């Protein structure tokens, strides 16, 4: 089984040293940097805006995988493109026209992602599967790091993988929330090829990042 892309979520990093943290992730072998953008409206938490992403851009060559937990999301696409995002992943519930939003992301020259909450049906994918480069399945309800992995996500990963394969899609299938070395193997076995992890990567501080990432890659 190929090893998954590891996408550390900087929500769990030291926000007082964000530039050093993303540089440390690159040194530690991370594949992408998962940037959790929260607006205090779509989710009950506020994190970082486009200016912070722009400030982080020179500190790493890794792709910025920006998870937009923002509503309405459409007014923000260009700002995060200008800030240096590579992937923009949106929730269907964050705007009235998902098909148009995903098309706009690609028109801006970025990779388009759709993210499904634990309570959101996979049927959303049927209408937009050709418009996405990434499908993100939330294994927690969004808003905070450090939550427990929702076990029913494993079956949802299997069903999503079957949908993507049947459509001949080359989109990444990413899982986000409560991912640890204890469940990473099951996620990959179910069909995920990219794993987001915050707590499990940043636990123990910078000296532990490489081992934590390796533990997720080889789980
Ligand atoms: C939650 C975020 C997740 C979270 C993951 O709303 O989308 O990316 O930061 O953090 P852990 O891995 O600690 O659950
Ligand atoms: Zn996220």
Image (cartoon, rainbow, N blue to C red):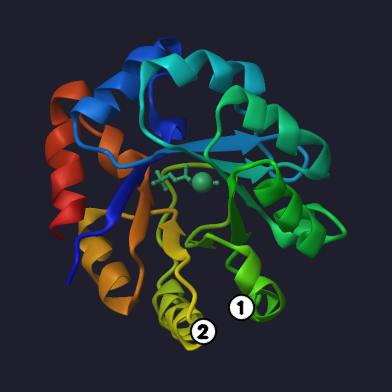
Q: Which residue is mark 1?
A: 122
Q: Which residue is mark 2?
A: 163
Identify the image quadrant of residue 190. Answer: bottom left
Foreground pick, 162 / 109:
109
Q: Position of residue 197 (x, y in %)?
A: 35, 46
Q: Position of residue 69 (x, y in %)?
A: 66, 44
Mark 1 and mark 2 lie on one chain; the one further toward the N terminus is 1
All told, the count of numbered labels is 2
What number is the disc on residue 214? Answer: none
Cα distance in 3D space between marks 1 and 2: 9 Å
Local crowd at mark 1 within 10 Å, few (<14), some, or many (≥20)?
some
Instruction: Give the residue at x 43% y 79%.
Output: 161
Instruction: Give the residue at x 45% y 86%.
Output: 162
- Give the structural element (helix, strand or loop) at label 2: helix
- Horizontally, residue 117 falls left or right of residue 75, namely left
Q: Position of residue 123 (x, y in %)?
A: 67, 81
Foreground pick, 85 / 51:
85
Instruction: Give the residue at x 45% y 67%.
Output: 150
């Amino acid at each position: 089984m190929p090893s998954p892309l590891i996408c550390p979520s900087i929500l769990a990093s030291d926000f007082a040293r964000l530039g050093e943290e993303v540089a440390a992730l690159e040194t530690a072998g991370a594949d992408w940097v998962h940037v959790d953008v929260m607006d205090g409206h779509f989710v009950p938490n506020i994190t970082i805006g486009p200016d912070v992403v722009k400030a982080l851009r020179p500190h790493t060559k890794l792709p910025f995988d920006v998870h937009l937990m923002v509503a309405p999301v459409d007014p923000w696409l260009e700002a995060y493109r200008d800030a240096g995002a590579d992937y923009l992943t949106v929730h269907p519930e964050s705007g009235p026209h998902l098909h148009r939003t995903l098309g706009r992301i690609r028109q801006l020259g970025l990779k388009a992602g759709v993210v499904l909450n634990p309570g959101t049906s996979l049927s959303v994918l049927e209408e937009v599967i050709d418009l996405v480069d990434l499908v993100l399945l939330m294994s927690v309800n969004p808003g905070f790091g450090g939550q427990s992995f929702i076990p029913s996500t494993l079956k949802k990963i299997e069903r999503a993988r079957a949908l993507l394969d049947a459509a001949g899609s080359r989109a990444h299938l990413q899982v986000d929330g409560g991912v640890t070395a204890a469940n990473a193997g099951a996620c990959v076995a179910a069909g995920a090829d990219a794993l987001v992890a915050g707590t499990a990567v940043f636990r123990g501080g910078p000296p532990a990042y490489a081992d934590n990432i390796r533990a997720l890659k080889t789980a």
